[in-house]
């Protein structure tokens, strides 16, 4: 009987629900006697079966207290409906609780992780549900989780829900914005600390524009948001984040400034910290230089590839006429001469030239946006493809425009093979080095977050 009810709840089968009640009028009441077990109401709320939820609650006559009953995983029907984004069910459950003066009890109910239904909706980015919950119980916006002491804004940043973050700050929190913007979690980290640590450029740029945000708020370790870019492993987006925070008036912590000024009283830990800061600064400068250099190189190669396509080697026919001795009927003005004289080689040349051009453009596009260390693998791969393609292109052009058949020479083939193996080994070595660097340094940032 219970198995059929659970299946009916999952599918929203009202006929099966009515049949079960006719067979045993107390079956729904029995399901809610024991706490800590899943009921068909939990399942229907999770799968968005609104009509089933309404009929189930009408037939079961459950109380407001039973409505907030947890399943074995520590979630109430409201938590499940909120996390899944079923706003109609959330609205119905809250109206049901409102009639029994139990809205606050239902909304403030926390799961085993200390999250309210609003927290669950924010984590999933369900804006419609967020709106419904705050309309019925705005007080729930100030609740924090049990262990991490995280607010709704912390959870929005932590789970990359930027739209939910903007919606809460711009439209729903009202006078609570200032306190929540600058509220610290268990480690004293504000949402700006979290956004900086996660390299969320869009979120950082949005937050520093908030007039009530304390951009220089410190956590329990005395670190400000700007310090986080130096505390975590290097990432190219740090350059943009640092610029945004400094533009908003952000600065490094006073502890760090004092250590720099009192140079005669440095402890080993202070000296080590300053050395890391200097290394971080050099990394930032190195990143800017190498990005600029690669973009310039890719731009030049793209220009050369475009020029080869525009004016291919050998020139173009200037008149109409027969193609004597080349196996084709006639040539046309503007048509490439080498296309008629050596069509197969010309096709290979144009294919290689296209690869060079597209790889150069891809390199430029990849470098225009900030990227994590792993994206260097993509950039280096594309650069290697570009270099290999332009090498093949060079040999083809020499072979087609001179009597020297480079591609038929064993030495030329050997050079190309050795170059290809070298590129592959270099790329694989870079990948292993990047993975080692990330795993070695990731714990450094997690020390604070």
Image: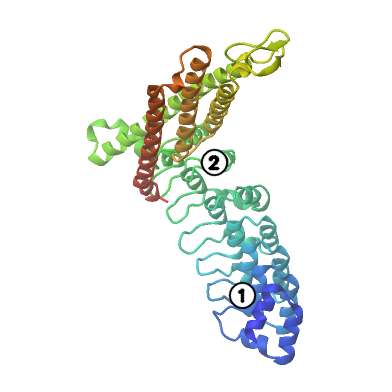
Q: Give the image's coloring scheme.
A: rainbow
Give me the residue at 53% from left, 12% from top: 401
401 vs 105: above or below: above
Do callouts 1 and 2 mark residues in contact (Cβ within 8 Å)?
no
- In this picture, residue 53 sits left or right of residue 312: right
Label 1, label 2: how far apart the Cα atoms are: 37 Å
Front residue of 203 and 378 = 378
For residue 381, side relative to residue 264 (left or right):
right
Q: Tell me the quarter of the picture where residue 353 sits.
A: top right
Residue 318: percent from the left, percent from the top? 69, 7
Residue that numbered label 2 is attached to: 204
Q: Is 103 in front, or is 242?
A: 242
Q: Nearer the viewer, residue 119 or 427?
A: 427
Q: Secondary structure at mark 1?
A: loop
Query: In the rendered view, would you say 302 is above or below 250?
Result: above
Chain-order first, disc 1 or disc 2: 1
115 relative position to 98: left or right: left
In the image, residue 135 above or below residue 360 = below
Q: Quadrant of residue 95?
A: bottom right
Q: Nearer the viewer, residue 66 or 251?
A: 66
Residue 202 quadrant: top right
User: How many discs appear?
Assistant: 2
- Residue 391: horizontal and vertical position, in percent? 46, 23
Question: Does residue 55 show up?
Answer: yes
What residue sits right under mark 1 in the picture? 68
The quarter in which the N terminus is drawn is bottom right
Q: Position of residue 290 (x, y in %)?
A: 43, 26
């Amino acid at each position: 009987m219970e198995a059929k009810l659970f299946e009916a709840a999952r599918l929203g089968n009202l006929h099966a629900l009515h049949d079960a009640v006719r067979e045993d009028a107390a079956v729904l009441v029995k399901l809610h006697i024991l706490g800590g077990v899943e009921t068909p109401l939990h399942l229907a709320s999770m799968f968005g079966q609104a009509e089933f939820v309404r009929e189930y609650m009408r037939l079961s006559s459950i109380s407001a207290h039973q409505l907030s009953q947890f399943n074995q995983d520590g979630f109430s029907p409201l938590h499940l409906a909120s996390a899944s984004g079923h706003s109609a069910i959330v609205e119905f459950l809250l109206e049901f609780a409102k009639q029994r003066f139990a809205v606050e009890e239902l909304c403030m109910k926390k799961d085993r992780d200390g999250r309210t239904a609003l927290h669950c909706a924010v984590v999933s980015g369900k804006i419609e549900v967020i709106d419904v919950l705050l309309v019925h119980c705005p007080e729930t916006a100030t609740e924090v989780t049990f262990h991490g002491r995280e607010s709704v804004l912390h959870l929005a940043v932590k789970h990359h829900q930027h739209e939910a973050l903007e919606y809460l700050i711009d439209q729903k929190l009202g006078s609570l914005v200032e306190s929540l913007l600058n509220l610290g979690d268990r480690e004293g980290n504000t949402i700006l600390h979290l956004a900086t640590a996660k390299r969320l450029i869009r979120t950082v740029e949005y937050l520093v524009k908030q007039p009530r945000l304390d951009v220089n708020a410190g956590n329990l370790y005395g670190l400000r948001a700007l310090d986080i870019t130096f505390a975590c492993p290097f990432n190219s987006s740090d350059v943009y984040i640092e610029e945004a925070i400094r533009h908003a008036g952000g600065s490094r912590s006073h502890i760090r400034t004092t250590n720099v000024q009192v140079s005669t009283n440095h402890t080993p830990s202070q000296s080590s910290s300053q050395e890391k800061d200097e290394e971080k600064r050099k990394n930032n400068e190195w990143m800017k230089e190498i990005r600029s250099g690669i973009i310039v190189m890719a731009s030049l190669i793209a220009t050369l590839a475009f020029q080869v396509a525009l004016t291919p080697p050998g020139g173009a026919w200037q008149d109409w006429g027969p193609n004597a001795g080349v196996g084709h009927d006639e040539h046309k003005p503007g048509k490439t001469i080498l296309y008629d004289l050596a069509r197969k080689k010309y096709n290979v040349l144009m294919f290689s030239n296209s690869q060079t051009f597209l790889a150069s453009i891809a390199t430029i596009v990849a470098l225009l946006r900030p990227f994590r260390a792993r994206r260097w693998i993509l950039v280096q791969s594309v650069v290697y493809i570009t270099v290999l393609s332009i090498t093949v292109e060079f040999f083809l052009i020499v072979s087609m425009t001179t009597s020297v058949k480079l591609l038929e020479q064993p030495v030329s083939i050997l050079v190309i093979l050795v170059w290809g193996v070298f590129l592959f080994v270099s790329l694989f070595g870079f990948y292993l080095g990047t993975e080692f660097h990330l795993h070695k340094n990731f714990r450094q940032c997690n020390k604070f977050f």
